[in-house]
Image: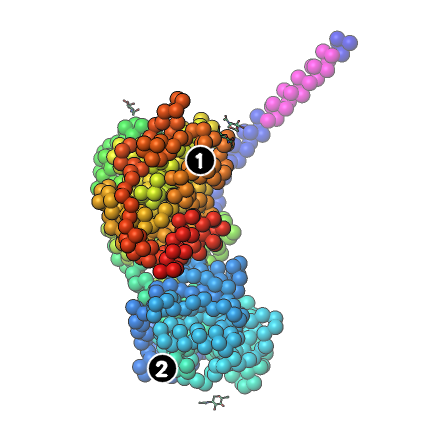
Amino acid sequence: MVALWKLMRGVRQLELHRLILALIIFCLLSMAFLAYYVSNSPKIKEAPPLPFSDCGGGGAMAPGLGLGADGPGGQRAPLFLPPRQGWQRQMKTMDVSRTEPLVLVFVESIYSQLGQEVVAILESSRFHYRTEIAPAKGDMPTLTQHNRGRYTLIIYENILKYVNLDAWNRDLIDKYCSEYGVGVIGFFRANENSLLSAQLKGFPLFLHSHLGLRDYRINPNAPLLYITKPNQVEQGILPGDDWTVFQSNHSTYEPVLLASTRSSEGVAHFGSSTVRALHATVVQDLGLHDGIQRVLFGNNLNYWLHKLIFVDAIAYLTGRRLCLSLDRHVLVDVDDIFVGKEGTRMKISDVEALLNAQNKLRTLVPHFTFNLGFSGKFYHTGTDEEDQGDDMLLQHRNDFWWFPHMWSHMQPHLFHNVSVLAEQMRLNRVFAQEHGIPTDMGYAVAPHHSGVYPVHSQLYEAWKSVWNIRVTSTEEYPHLRPARYRRGFIHNGIQVLPRQTCGLFTHTIFYNEYPGGSKELDKSIRGGELFLTVLLNPISIFMTHLSNYGNDRLGLYTFESLVKFVQCWTNLRLQTLPPLQLADKYFEIFPEERDPLWQNPCHDKRHKDIWSKEKTCDRLPKFLIIGPQKTGTTALHSFLSLHPAISSSFPSPVTFEEIQFFSGANYDHGIDWYMDFFPFPSNVSTDFMFEKSANYFDTEAAPKRAAALLPRAKVVAVLINPSDRAYSWYQVGGSGPGPSDPGSQQHHHGRVCCLMNSPVCVQLHIVDGAMLRSKPALVMEGIQRFLSVTPIFNYTQALMFDESKGFWCQRVEGSRSKCLGKSKGRKYPEMSSESRSFLAEYYRDHNVDLLRLLNRLGHPLPSWLRQELQSSSWS
Ligand SMILES: *[C@@H]1O[C@H](CO)[C@@H](O)[C@H](O)[C@H]1NC(C)=O
Ligand SMILES: *[C@@H]1O[C@H](CO)[C@@H](O)[C@H](O)[C@H]1NC(C)=O
Ligand SMILES: *[C@@H]1O[C@H](CO)[C@@H](O)[C@H](O)[C@H]1NC(C)=O
Ligand SMILES: *[C@@H]1O[C@H](CO)[C@@H](O)[C@H](O)[C@H]1NC(C)=O
């Protein structure tokens, strides 16, 4: 038995030996294989792709199709109608004072694709808009307010919804448009039920649908052209066979885009022999028919040229009110110029190509200069050939711009101690000085965006002290996606600019291995995402990496091709500026972006990953008492503090005990500063932390800020009769912060309405201030239920009425009471009945508004409001 067992073990050991041997051989073989392919990859020997050299639309070229298909600069025959004198590029003038700069978009549904694309372009352009589901009949949104137009442009996702409006609403909207000089953009998208040919109801315009088209061209006489450069032809077949063309003999219609039909069968229903005639797929209605200017698209926005024309149409119809200038600034950052795996880095030939491309780009983009980010620790860590590439970069250091990227590419948020972080930066600075790299650009980028947003204040401090950094850029503010929402902000003297991706990451090395195929990269350049980024952003800072400039040099391919494409199709003036000037320009164009809007770092996984592990998101309040002042909020604060599960913020030594974070300059300190006012909760789910700042109620910015950082926080407001408040302000003579005359409080109820429109509204609890004074235990019970705090604390036991003070105080041992300071809960002489009725009248409209609001909320009416409305309606 034992022998058998030994034998078995022997056999097993033998097998194990063999197995290990086989494994070792396999490993050696695969290492050899890998080594061969990484260093001698046949792909590297393939020449890098050549950037676009002409303006052609790619795909099959179809030469000799006649009609002005000659190259750029060539003389061209008129395309449709002879140019009309006087209309050529005439700008529509618009009285800016008569309408709000707001676009009204009628969509088919909240999910409809075209509607979302329209909205995406408006959002990218930072134009304000409002969407409405297009009504077939019935309610039309109100178009005017106090004799001013509420919208400067109307867009219909489906133009038939406009054309088929009932007479009453159609009349309403058309009268509005002609009176206020407002234009209409509409899309016609044929579906299976559309007729092949039909007249657009009420217009001298005929539609022919379900066509396949080819050879797209732009009518150089179309007045709306601004960014679009007309002397190009997109040769070849247009995608899809559901195009609609417009036909008219009325002089109000000027074609914008024209194409030929793909085949002769396609035009049978034109009933003529215009086989190769040009047909308009986008037309501009000059307003000669009914006084309203329109732009009509015979398809959706899928085709890239439609997006470009759409942007021009918005500019034209709003008299360039919703329009960027033609200047576009581009900065190309090469992050990690020394950081890259052996075998993927730049060699001498790659550096030469970089310099050549830069020179070539400078002929099209004045002063174009690559901006190189360096982590000194990785200098000379490639193969010999690659180390020579590093040296060559440094030889030509004065041909480039440079920015520091940390010494060892560490993420700044991992450093809690600012002096240790600064020490890391100093190493990189010493490296720069030793190698003669310029250190005065004032710009830096953090590896992986770490520490920039969410703000790691240590990074800002260290950057300023070591490098005198004044500008940085990130993709993370407010979030990575969608890219069109990215914005800039200024914090602690450092201007943070949004950063754009161009589709090249560290691992995008070979053209043929581009994710989804090289066609995807070309599509992005030819009117796709990358082109749109430049079209819709006056300033774009692009992020690329070292590996995009070795290997297939996709960085060079991408930017040379992009610049060429932009030049071919647009009148945009591409240029570049060093980061400091770029930042000044950015905040000149978007001054409203200076102030940041802080969010909770734990609500975005990417933010959480680049946020210090030594910080927690738990040190934030679960509810806020927002005031207003002089309503008993201080008493409420002290009552709440008696609750065992509720804790208030630490008092601020500066601002009257209150933190006043969301309302003023303290907001600039950032969320680390705010969180320091709160204890670490002992149990996150059961502890209720709060803060009270009575001026939140009156501050315009507070609701938006609070909703951004504390989207789930509940809000408590105390409302008393505004007449009493006014009187109370009058009595204290306006001492302390806040408005000092009753008149300036009239907007307070309006403020509640404003809160209602923010996400905060569903979480709002309104406390009747009069009740808080007379029956605090009842009010406190209501608040506890609103907060869902447990256990319910019995305030009947905890509070007692102090006869001498005349109000409710905390009950301490036996029958003694502990009350608030002297100035609180003060009693004033009774208001005269004349004053009272004057004030009642004064506030009546606001009280009526409040009544409506509370009814909508389903809140019970405070007794004072009921009384006030009754008494003032008698007067
Ligand atoms: C335009 O076309 C309509 C219908 O085909 C025709 O009746 C009308 O006379 C034409 N007008 C002009 C100005 O050619
Ligand atoms: C930061 O680190 C330095 C050097 O290690 C040390 O002297 C200093 O006390 C640290 N500062 C803090 C606030 O921990
Ligand atoms: C917090 O309180 C809840 C409810 O009482 C309890 O279930 C949970 O275990 C507590 N958590 C901690 C960390 O004490
Ligand atoms: C609170 O305490 C009072 C007096 O001790 C008592 O009458 C009342 O029932 C208590 N209320 C609740 C909800 O327990």
Q: Nearer the viewer, mark 2 or mark 1?
A: 1
Residue 153 locus on image (x, y percent): 39, 68
Residue in the image at 55% along x and 29% along y: 27
Q: How is the image coloured?
A: rainbow
Q: Quadrant of the N terminus?
A: top right
Sequence-first tag of 2 and 1? 2
Is 19 magenta? The answer is yes
Furthest-top residue in view?
2
- Residue behind label 1 places its C-beta within 8 angstroms of ligand 4: yes
Snapshot quadrant of residue 451:
top left
Q: Which residue is mark 1?
A: 777
Residue under pointer 2:
83
Between 521 and 166, the residue placed more toward the observer is 166
From where the camera sits, is residue 53 visible?
Answer: no
User: Callout 1: helix, strand or loop?
Assistant: helix
Q: Is residue 611 above or below residue 252?
A: above
Label 2 SS? loop
Q: Residue at x 22, y 45 (%)?
A: 733
Q: How many marks?
A: 2
Instruction: Answer with left or right where residue 799 lies relative to residue 429.
Output: right
Q: Is residue 3 above or below residue 706?
A: above
Q: Which is more toward the observer, 491 or 166?
A: 166
Residue 192 occupies quadrant = bottom right
Q: Residues within 10 Å of mark 1 (few under 14, many from 20)?
A: many
Task: Residue at 36% x, 27% y: name it.
Answer: 817
Amino acid type for the residue under numbered disc 1: Ala
Q: Residue at x 38, y 53 (%)?
A: 868
Circle 2 crowding by C-alpha within 10 Å: few under 14, some 14–19, many from 20: some
Cβ–Cβ under 8 Å for marks 2 and 1: no
